[in-house]
């Protein structure tokens, strides 16, 4: 992908929204049985901001991300998306989820559908776009992730990196205001990581609001506006990438970074 | 004697003994009598074409009704079994345990004879009582197959669909169930073969000319002619139905393994 795709059109205009905070959690707690995974997380992600969450496995970073679109129901605390409390039982969660794209570690493309059908099914069934409009948007997104020749392929015939790029395109087809990325390169062969990160970098440059759980420290360093280090269910340290990744204040953060680098 | 030598000797001994047994049986049986009692060509010929156009046709009709009814009911029971509402789950578990635990023959008798006595009216339709009874029994087995199929679809599929804004039921209908059915085609085809054979249980219901199926046909013709040939012919016709279906199931299973 030599030409830089532009995602500029997705940037929500700040004045159209009642708040410039895209994602906010207040005293967010999550327990699985007796296991307290999140212990009161206060997080704010501004519109257009790219925030990376790092931390050891089991620290609760994925759970935190999954609480942001209620794939996990928080035990206590609140989650606000663009100022709307989505933990309120009266909130239409399906409607809110349309505005939040999510990309998963395991891609989760629909294996029984072609790439184009993967891109259009939610547009047609959820947004009620007609077929030609949905396919036009789908083709646009495929061009942007550099896979326009794969329209008719089934996911099983794509490499992991290609599948993950299709998954990103599938989310973008819904024209979300923000995107959640849950360790999206962790299941990829090392040589395929770059192409996915490149798409994400372009997306970040276009002004998309992004909350990214990742082990790619290089990506976090170069792309993130802010880095959070999550440890044992709390945000242990946060700041600019240089602060957290280069000059961490906590021994625990230094220890973690040391382990990741030596990997 | 080496171990291999001994194993070889034992193999030969078993082989010889088997031959001897079969040979003795073959000599002991009065083949002319057997042929006369159950393999008479003239009686066999007499069954055709009615055994195909009437009995086999009805067997197929009962199977199709039983299978499609069982599939729809089984899907409903499977979704109840997976529901987050406890009462639905209990009902589904109760249904499955009941109709898998009770002999199918008994269920058929209760629906064929019990319901008319209890409610004062029988299930309408020529094929009604038999088809309903078969569907009810088949649903219990199919519900478990369908549940297993739905559970075999990775959780991430539902999560991806929900994260795109689909409701739970939309995600089930568009994403999960189509994939589950692909996984379920081989076991469901096996279910279909079993159902073809289970239609024979319907022969206990008072079968009229209109609903007579293969087993009843064989029995009636055997009573009529005092000869077992019609039963053998009926068995042969069952095989014409079940063997191709069984082959189909095996083929679908192989193909399913390749694409996964």
Image: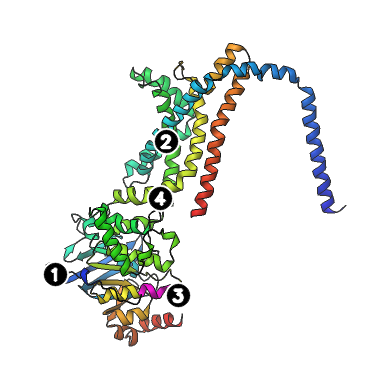
Task: Evaluate whether label 2 is on the same chain as label 4.
Answer: yes
Q: Which residue is mark 3?
A: A191
Check disc 2 and report the residue beneath it: B139
Q: Relative to residue B128, is residue B51 drawn left or right?
A: right
Label 2: how many Cα within 10 Å (few below 14, some 14–19, many 20+): many
Q: Marks 2/4: CA distance?
A: 20 Å
Q: Which mark is residue A19?
A: 1
- Label 4 to label 3: alpha-carbon separation: 31 Å
Which of pointers 3 and 1 lies earlier in the amino acid sequence?
Answer: 1
Visual colour scheme:
rainbow
Circles 3 and 2: CB atoms closer than 8 Å: no
For label 1, the SS is: loop
> Which numbered disc, 3 or 1, marks the residue closer to the eye?
3
Identify the residue at horizontal 43%, vertical 34% (top origin): B67
Mark 2 or 4, nearer chain start: 2
Span colored in magenta: A190-197
Specify the subunit that label 4 lies on. B
Instruction: From the top left corner, tell me how far across and down residue B144 is, in percent.
Output: 44, 42
Badges 3 and 1, same chain: yes
- Nearest the viewer among A216 and A76 is A216
Residue at which label 4 appears: B179
Alpha-carbon distance for marks 3 and 2?
Answer: 49 Å
């Amino acid at each position: 992908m030599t030409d830089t795709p532009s995602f500029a059109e997705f940037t929500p205009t700040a004045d159209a929204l009642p708040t410039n905070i895209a994602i906010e959690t207040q005293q967010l707690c999550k327990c699985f049985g007796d296991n307290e995974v999140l212990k009161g997380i206060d997080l704010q992600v501004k519109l257009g901001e790219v925030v990376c969450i790092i931390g050891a496995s089991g620290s609760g970073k994925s759970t935190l991300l999954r609480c942001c679109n209620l794939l996990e129901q928080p035990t206590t605390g609140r989650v606000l998306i663009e100022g709307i409390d989505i933990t309120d039982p009266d909130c239409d969660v399906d409607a809110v989820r349309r505005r939040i794209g999510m990309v998963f570690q395991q891609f989760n493309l629909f294996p029984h559908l072609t790439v184009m059908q993967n891109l259009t099914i939610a547009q047609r069934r959820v947004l009620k776009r007609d077929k030609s409009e949905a396919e036009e948007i789908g083709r646009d997104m495929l061009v942007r992730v550099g896979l326009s020749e794969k329209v008719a392929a089934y996911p099983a015939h794509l490499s992991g990196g290609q599948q993950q790029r299709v998954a990103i395109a599938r989310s973008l087809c819904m024209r979300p205001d923000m995107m959640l990325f849950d360790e999206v390169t962790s299941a990829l062969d090392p040589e395929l990581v770059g192409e996915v990160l490149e798409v994400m970098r372009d997306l970040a440059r276009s002004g998309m609001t992004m909350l990214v759980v990742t082990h790619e420290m290089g990506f976090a360093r170069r792309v993130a506006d802010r880095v959070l280090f999550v440890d044992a269910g709390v945000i242990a340290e946060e700041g600019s990438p240089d602060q957290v990744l280069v000059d961490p204040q906590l021994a625990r953060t230094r220890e973690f970074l040391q382990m990741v680098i030596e990997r | 004697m080496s171990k291999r030598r001994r194993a070889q000797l034992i193999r030969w001994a078993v082989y010889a003994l088997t031959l001897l047994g079969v040979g003795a049986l073959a000599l002991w049986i009065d083949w002319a009598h057997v042929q006369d009692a159950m393999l008479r060509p003239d009686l066999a010929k007499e069954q055709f074409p009615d055994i195909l156009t009437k009995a086999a046709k009805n067997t197929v009709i009962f199977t199709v009704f039983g299978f499609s009814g069982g599939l729809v009911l089984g899907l409903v029971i499977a979704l109840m079994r997976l529901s987050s509402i406890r009462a639905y789950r209990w009902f589904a578990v109760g249904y499955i345990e009941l109709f898998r635990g009770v002999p199918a023959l008994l269920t058929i008798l209760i629906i064929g004879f019990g319901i008319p006595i209890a409610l004062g009216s029988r299930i309408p339709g020529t094929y009604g009582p038999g088809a309903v009874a078969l569907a009810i029994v088949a649903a219990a087995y199919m519900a478990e197959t369908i549940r297993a199929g739905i559970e075999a679809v990775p959780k991430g599929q539902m999560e991806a669909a929900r994260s795109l804004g689909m409701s739970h039921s939309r995600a089930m209908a568009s994403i999960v169930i189509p994939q589950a059915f692909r996984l379920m085609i081989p076991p469901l085809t096996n279910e279909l073969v079993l159902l073809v054979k289970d239609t024979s249980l319907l022969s206990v219901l008072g079968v009229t000319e209109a609903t007579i199926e293969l087993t009843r046909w064989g029995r009636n013709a055997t009573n009529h002619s005092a000869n077992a040939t019609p039963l053998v012919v009926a068995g042969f016709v069952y095989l014409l139905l079940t063997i191709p279906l069984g082959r189909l199931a095996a083929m679908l299973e192989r193909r399913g393994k390749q694409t996964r």
